[in-house]
């Protein structure tokens, strides 16, 4: 079995690394220590072809909760993650060994991430990413405007996009400050907030093309709309501001998403 992440990025050769399999398995036992995980919806069978998971981003605990949710759904995605994590000691090595995809936002080589993701899809891997490109700073924690990377990836490869809506992970760990993050995480052991994920139906993008100007933005808006619609039922009792407000998270409406 091929387990080397760099080798498995070649088309047709992707095999889930053993470390990533182990972490997915472990997440099913560790994550419930900090929250009550609820997962609904469905995903395509990965054996029928690669697909893309597009997830809203609401907190620092998101990737850990997503790992457990994906384990429940039986998928092992290659996650598109910020380059800063890859440059961190230990964490960066783990991410690389698991085959995740580095996104160097704000750097000249940021477009390499799309090439890596295309290769991953060509190799039969499921790819997961946060189209907003950052944790939402919208005051109500509703999705912000998406960046076009996930949409471009789908239009270039033909891989369907599965919208994944999540709610509750923002209560597990705060946005900033190592001490504050640690204290909030530890307190989650007895608070155990409910963290919900919903995997929706594929977004309809068949009428769009990667070569047509403006189509990537149209696709992005459809993806964000699908995430938004999936999110509404998850937070039906919090339709405005969330009950818990993270005091370390800055707020701005500059990138608020307005469905068309």
Image (cartoon, rainbow, N blue to C red):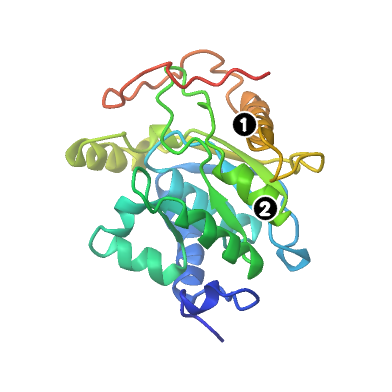
Element type where label 2 sits in the image: helix
Farthest residue toward the bottom? 1
What residue would you read off at disc 1?
224
Between 127 and 187, the one lying in front of the other is 127
Farthest residue toward the top? 240
The residue shown at (42%, 38%) is 192
Closer to the N terminus: mark 1 or mark 2?
2
Write down the quadrant of residue 229 in the picture: top right
Q: Is residue 254 above or below residue 50?
A: above
Image check: 160 left or right of 22? right
The residue shown at (44%, 68%) is 98
What residue would you read off at disc 2?
156
The residue shown at (61%, 20%) is 236
Distance, label 1 to label 2, CA atoms, is 18 Å
Image check: 188 left or right of 260? left
Image check: 91 left or right of 100? left
Q: Is residue 168 above or below residue 91?
A: above
| Placement of the C terminus among the 4 image quadrants | top right
């Amino acid at each position: 079995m091929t387990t080397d992440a760099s080798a498995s990025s070649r088309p047709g050769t992707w095999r889930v690394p053993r470390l990533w399999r182990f972490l997915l398995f472990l997440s099913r036992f560790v994550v419930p220590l900090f929250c009550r995980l609820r997962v609904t919806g469905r995903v395509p069978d990965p054996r029928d072809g690669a697909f893309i998971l597009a997830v809203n981003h609401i907190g620092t605990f998101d990737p850990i909760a997503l790992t457990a949710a994906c384990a429940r759904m039986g998928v092992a995605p290659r996650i598109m993650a910020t380059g800063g994590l890859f440059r961190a000691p230990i964490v960066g090595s783990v991410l690389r060994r698991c085959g995740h995809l580095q996104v160097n936002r704000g750097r000249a080589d940021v477009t390499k991430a799309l090439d890596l993701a295309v290769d991953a899809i060509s190799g039969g891997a499921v790819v997961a990413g946060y189209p907003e490109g950052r944790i939402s700073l919208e005051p109500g924690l509703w999705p912000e405007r998406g960046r076009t990377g996930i949409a471009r990836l789908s239009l270039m490869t033909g891989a369907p996009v599965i919208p994944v809506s999540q709610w509750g992970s923002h209560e597990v760990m705060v946005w900033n400050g190592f001490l504050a993050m640690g204290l909030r995480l530890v307190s989650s052991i007895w608070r155990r907030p409910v963290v919900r994920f919903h995997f929706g139906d594929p977004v309809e993008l068949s009428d769009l093309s990667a070569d047509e100007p403006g189509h990537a933005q149209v696709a992005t808006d459809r993806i964000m709309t699908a995430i938004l619609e999936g999110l509404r039922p998850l937070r039906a009792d919090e339709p405005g501001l969330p009950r818990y407000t993270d005091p370390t998270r800055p707020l701005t409406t500059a990138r608020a998403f307005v469905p068309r």
